């Protein structure tokens, strides 16, 4: 009993790796994944015990305010990955290969994935699409870069898909997706994101694979779940598609907090005496980094 408890404690502290995630599937332990884009939130997610932190190209929307993910660049991904990396101790850091950084040639895909690892500190890279990327997945795996796949609604193909909608509802499309999932596993992928697919299909894929599936809008039978951080925190109260649950309403709290700050500034109630210095008190040793230190 005591031995089991100390094993569980050691496990809770140890950094999560690609093999850890496969072990979690075998143990039936659900994988908790969330996106992050900066060091402050990364630190909070790590503290909350999140297993996988994904620097998703969703940053095109939630950070840059764009309509889709298509204009996100590799340099932007590296910039955000480095920030997130600094906030993490235990969680597994996965970084998206953005649109057009792995579709042109195998060599470009390898070089760009390498930059996410070398410059961004990624422990794994994620790419969208199935068997057409088999060769790239195999090459990256062979050189030691773990690859996470992404099937179903693949946002980088939004123009071809005609919008953000549920995928693989028809039996033929479901069969294609299942075969793509098996092909990615065969090529060496260590995990697979399933986005916006019917629950039954996600269940079938999860049962057919040895590697874990991480669902978003794919039902509870996946081996783990992922959500965009800003969605689960309710930072945009208007954005609540079916697959998102707001676990907080931080958007409203931010507006309220900043509103109260503004009111106190305008009424000259902030800053109060305790938020500053006066010549009346003995000077403290000189701050090295300004008023915060
Ligand atoms: O870019 C992203 O945030 C993602 C998740 C939604 C899976 O790919």
Image: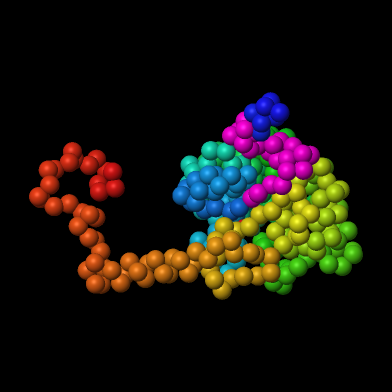
Image x and y of residue 275, in percent: 24, 55
Q: Residue furthest front?
A: 1
What are the residue bounds of the magenta stretch? 9-33
Characterize the magenta stretch by its predominant secondary structure: helix
Q: Residue at x 13, y 43 (%)?
A: 283
Residue 220: tell me if it is visible.
Answer: yes
| 25 displayed left or right of 227 | right
| 59 displayed left or right of 273 | right
Q: Residue at x 62, y 70 (%)?
A: 240
Q: Give the quarter of the image for residue 23.
A: top right
| Residue 108 lies within the magenta run | no
| Residue 30 lies within the magenta run | yes
Q: Is residue 194 above or below residue 261?
A: above
Q: Residue at x 83, y 52 (%)?
A: 205
| 131 displayed left or right of 216 | right
Q: How is the image coloured?
A: rainbow
Image x and y of residue 287, in percent: 22, 42
Image quarter of the C terminus: top left
Image x and y of residue 161, in percent: 73, 69
Image quarter of the N terminus: top right
Residue 72: tell me if it is visible.
Answer: no
| 258 displayed left or right of 127 | left
Please give the count of numbered marks on the rendered protein: 0
Q: Is residue 82 above or below residue 2?
A: below
């Amino acid at each position: 009993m005591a031995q089991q408890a100390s094993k569980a404690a050691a496990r809770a502290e140890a950094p999560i790796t690609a093999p850890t995630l496969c072990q979690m599937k075998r143990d039936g332990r659900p994988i908790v994944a969330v996106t992050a884009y900066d060091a402050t939130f990364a630190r909070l997610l790590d503290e909350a015990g999140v297993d996988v932190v994904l620097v998703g190209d969703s940053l095109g929307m939630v950070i840059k305010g764009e309509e889709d993910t298509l204009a996100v660049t590799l340099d932007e991904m590296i910039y955000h990955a480095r920030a997130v990396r600094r906030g993490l101790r235990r969680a597994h850091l996965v970084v998206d290969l953005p649109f057009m950084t792995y579709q042109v040639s195998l060599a470009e895909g390898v070089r760009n994935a390498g930059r996410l690892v070398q410059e961004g500190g990624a422990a794994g890279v994620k790419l969208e699409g199935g068997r057409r990327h088999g060769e790239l997945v195999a090459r990256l795996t062979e050189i030691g870069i773990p690859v996470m796949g992404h099937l179903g609604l693949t946002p980088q193909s939004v123009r071809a898909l005609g919008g953000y909608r549920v995928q693989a509802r028809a039996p033929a499309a479901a069969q294609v997706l299942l075969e793509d999932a098996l092909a990615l596993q065969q090529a060496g992928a260590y995990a697979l994101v399933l986005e916006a697919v019917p629950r039954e299909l996600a269940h079938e894929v999860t049962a057919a694979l040895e590697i874990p599936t991480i669902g978003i809008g794919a039902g509870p039978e996946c081996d783990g779940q992922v959500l965009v951080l800003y969605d689960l925190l309710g930072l945009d109260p208007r954005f609540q598609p079916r697959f998102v649950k707001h676990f907080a309403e931080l958007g409203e709290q931010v507006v309220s907090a900043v509103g109260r700050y503004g009111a106190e500034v305008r009424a000259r109630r902030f800053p109060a005496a305790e938020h500053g210095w006066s010549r009346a008190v003995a000077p403290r040793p000189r701050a090295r980094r300004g008023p915060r230190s």
